[in-house]
Image: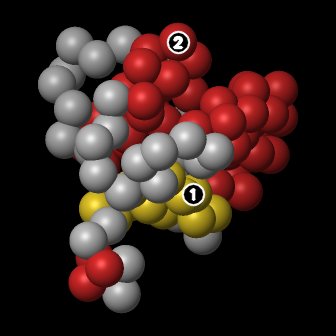
Amino acid sequence: MLADEGWRVAVVAEVSRTRDFYAALRTALDLPEWTGSNLDALWDVLTDLREPTALVWRGADSYAVARPQRWSQLLEVLTERSTQDPPFAVVLA
């Protein structure tokens, strides 16, 4: 449905480790392998998006349980990005 409205839908697979999250994000957004694996790099990638994007994170609860502090930090970045244009949404599935 979102794709029909012009949104890019990127699906992040279930992960429980931070490095796996960044690898899954690179895959979901078709990013180069050299893309950084830290919060600053995440912010840069998300603010470089030029089209409405929905990030669907499958099994996000597994990561939240395994990495509660990092989860909080990631959520902060994702939430902040969702307040900017172009539209950005996160779906925790």
Q: Position of residue 53 (x, y in %)?
A: 38, 56
Q: Which is more toward the observer, 58 or 74?
A: 74
In the image, what residue occupies the spot 22% across and 13% down? 34
Whether residue 28 can be seen here: yes
Q: What is the secondary structure assignment of the residue under circle 1?
A: strand
- The crowd level at tag 1 (other Cα within 10 Å; few <14, some 14-19, many 20+) is some
Residue 52 picture location, percent across and down: 36, 57
Image spot of residue 15 (x, y percent)? 53, 46
Q: Residue 11: x and y, percent?
A: 38, 60
Q: What colouring method underlies this structural image?
A: secondary structure
In this orientation, which residue lies closer to the viewer: 68 or 72?
72
Q: Quadrant of residue 79?
A: top right
Q: Is residue 67 visible?
A: no
Query: Image quarter for residue 35?
Result: top left
Question: Do the residues under discs 2 and 1 have CB atoms within 8 angstroms?
Answer: no
Of the residues under marks 2 and 1, which one precedes in the sequence?
2
Q: Which residue matches tag 1?
A: 90
Image mark for residue 40: 2
